[in-house]
Image (cartoon, helix red, strand yellow):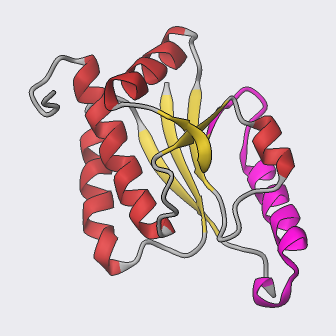
Amino acid sequence: MKILFYSVGKAHEAYVKQGVEDFTDRITRYFPVSWQIIAPPKNAGVMQEAELKKQEAALILQALQPDDQLILLDERGKQLSSPELAKLIQQKANESSKRLVFLIGGAFGVDDSITKRANFVWSLSKLVLPHMLVRLVLAEQVYRACTILRNEKYHHV
């Protein structure tokens, strides 16, 4: 199974780039992994929120394959402990999923079409976090989940 991180927005900012790259490299010990940064549509700054989310949804859906397992990150989703995330990843691997996609939506969230397409909606926190910080936390938590699956010492209860 391949793990993909999709994020709508700009390239990783310097203050998270090194951490994101470090944890992403660590994940490669367990699964092939990559990031895809989905650039917002042109003129995004002048679009109405609903139209922007609709156009971002079209870009996201274009990037997805029909059999992708999509985990959408959203503060209204279900919160998981690190062991529960590990279980979810293991479940997707056991189901012979080819691609497990974690999606960080745009500045205003995602269009309903993306929420409906998602196989799971996950909340890192009830707090609204900056997208760049979410990238770092996501990469670290997926790495942590991988170490839990292998009973390695990184995760302490």
84 and 9: which one is in front?
Answer: 84
- Picture quarter with the C terminus: top left
Give percent across and percent down for residue 116.
Answer: 82, 37
Which of 75/59 is in front? 75
Residue 120 image point, x, y percent:
64, 31
Residue lying at the far left of the rendered structure: 153
Which one is in front, 37 or 128?
128
Toward which corner of the image does residue 148 lie, by quadrant? Answer: top left
**Left of 126 or right of it: where is 143?**
left
* Residue at left offset 45%, top offset 23%: 89
Q: Is residue 73 visible?
A: no
Q: Position of residue 94 (x, y in %)?
A: 50, 9
Q: Residue at x 17, y 17 (%)?
A: 151
Most extreme residue toward the front is 126
With 30 as the anchor, is 118 left or right in this view?
right
79 over 5 or under it: above or below? above
**Can the viewer see residue 124 in this picture?**
yes
Q: Residue at horizontal 51%, vertical 52%? A: 126
Q: Which residues are magenta?
A: 44-71
Number of numbered discs on residues: 0
* Residue 32 in the image, given as x and y percentages of width and height: 41, 35
56 is within the stretch colored magenta: yes
In the picture, measured across the screen, residue 58 lies left or right of residue 45, that is right
Magenta span: predominant SS is helix
Q: Quadrant of residue 53?
A: bottom right
